[in-house]
Amino acid sequence: MRKEVLNQMFIFIIGAFSLVAALAWNSTIESIFKQIFGTPDKISAKLIYSIFITIIVVIVITTFSKLNNKYFSKE
């Protein structure tokens, strides 16, 4: 039981740090996007930004899932 609680605590801590890192990257990418495309006041700029972020997230999640399956599968 104690091991399970510690495991969950580590998972929550990693999740919290991941959120902080994601917010920092979001701010950075948004600043770069503003320099390239101007202020995102128009809905089209916000839509392009959202699509861009979604594509990046899908690529990262897919890559990490493949790495996880390759190195940590229980076969």
Image: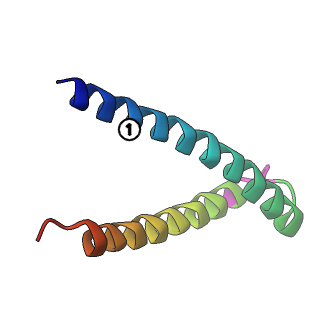
**Relative horizontal placement of residue 49, taking residue 4 as reference (left or right):** right
Specify whether residue 16 is painted magenta: no
| Residue extent of the magenta highlight | 40-44
Report the front residue among 60 and 29.
60
Vertical position of residue 24 compared to residue 54: above or below = above
Q: Residues within 10 Å of mark 1 (few under 14, many from 20)?
A: few
Residue 48 in picture, x, y percent from top left: 64, 64
Outermost residue, left direction? 75
Q: Which amino acid type is marked by label 1?
A: Ile
> What residue sits right under mark 1 in the picture?
11
Query: Which quadrant of the rendered structure holds the C terminus?
Result: bottom left
| Residue 14 placement, left or right of 25 | left
Classify residue 72 by image quadrant.
bottom left
Judged left or right of residue 50, residue 7 is left
| Callout 1: SS | helix
Magenta stretch, overall SS: loop
Q: Is residue 33 above or below residue 42?
A: below
Labels in figure, total: 1
Residue 73 x/y as whole percent: 20, 67
Residue 41 among those drawn in magenta: yes
| Residue at x 32%, y 74% (from the top left corner) | 66
For image coordinates 88% across by 63% down, the residue present is 35
